Amino acid sequence: MLKIGLTGGIGCGKSTVSSLFQQLNVPVIDADVISHHIVKPGQKGLDLVVSLFGENILLGNGELNRAALRDCVFFDLEAKKKLEDALHPMIFEEIRFQLNLIHDEPYCIVSIPLLFETQSQRLVDRVLVVDCDKKTQYERVQKRDNLTISSIDNIISTQVSAEFRRNNANDVLDNSEDSSLLAQQVKKLHNFYISLSLSQDTALS
């Protein structure tokens, strides 16, 4: 099975692209979904976060207060590293587990926002980057997360550059235009990945 690593900068549309592949019945493993699950009440990840930052990052119902956690790590690189060192091994363990559950599929999508930053290219066979122009990127993040320009700048500064992603991608999706054009690009890649998978199977047989 061909493993396609999907990545891109904040606000570029990784979730939208994942959804379009899912509509084509392609299995999608999403690191963001996993990261949210492992910090739910009763999960080991939440216990680790509490041990690092204290119970003040919990809501009254015992769930993670994501806003409080974001405040703890947003401008503190050391705290951010501690959080990533605690949770990333659990996230990638779950990714590998889910990969082992997929059988008889030509290919799957593994969505990892920090694929290059965590040097996780070895997990996949091919890298797909979703990109958009900077103005569109900022507008989407402001609308979605209600963040200031300086806050968005801070997040982007902790990630590899858009140029680095494009230069190290096998495939690039431009998500600057309307969604119908993006869907066409995804369908074209879908057919391409199926053909690549068939070629791979033939070479191995």
Image: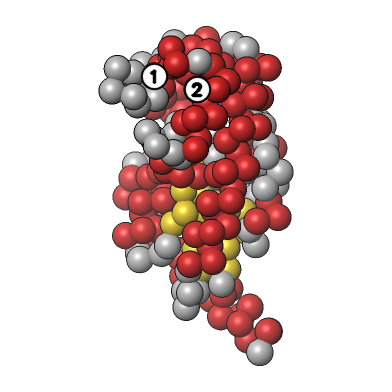
> What's the amino acid at mark 1?
Leu
What colouring method underlies this structural image?
Answer: secondary structure
Q: Residue at x 34, y 42 (%)?
A: 178
Q: Is mark 1 on a helix, strand or loop?
A: loop
State which quadrant residue 148 falls in. top left
- As measured in the structure, the alpha-carbon distance from the residue carrying label 2 to the one carrying label 1 is 8 Å
Quarter of the picture containing the C terminus is bottom right
Along the horizontal axis of the image, is 199 left or right of 111? Answer: right
List the residue tagged with mark 2. 50
Q: Residue at x 48, y 69 (%)?
A: 102
Residue 61 in the image: state x and y as whole percent.
28, 23
Along the horizontal axis of the image, is 41 left or right of 119? Answer: left
Q: Residue at x 32, y 50 (%)?
A: 180
Residue at the outermost bottom position: 205
Disc on the earlier residue, 2 or 1? 2
> What's the amino acid at mark 2?
Val
Residue 116 in the image: state x and y as whole percent.
67, 41
Looking at the image, can residue 174 be seen?
Answer: no
Along the viewing direction, whichever of 131 and 146 lies nearer the viewer: 146
Density class for disc 2 (Cα within 10 Å; few <14, some 14-19, many ≥20) is some
Along the viewing direction, whichever of 178 and 114 lies nearer the viewer: 114
User: How many badges with numbers are in the image?
Assistant: 2
Residue 160 in the image: state x and y as whole percent.
67, 32
Q: What element carries label 2?
A: helix
State which quadrant residue 153 falls in. top right
Q: What number is the disc on residue 58?
A: 1
Quarter of the picture containing the N terminus is bottom right
Q: Residue at x 41, y 41 (%)?
A: 37
Q: Is disc 2 in contact with disc 1, using a CB cutoff of under 8 Å?
A: yes
Looking at the image, can residue 127 be seen?
Answer: yes
Density class for disc 1 (Cα within 10 Å; few <14, some 14-19, many ≥20) is many
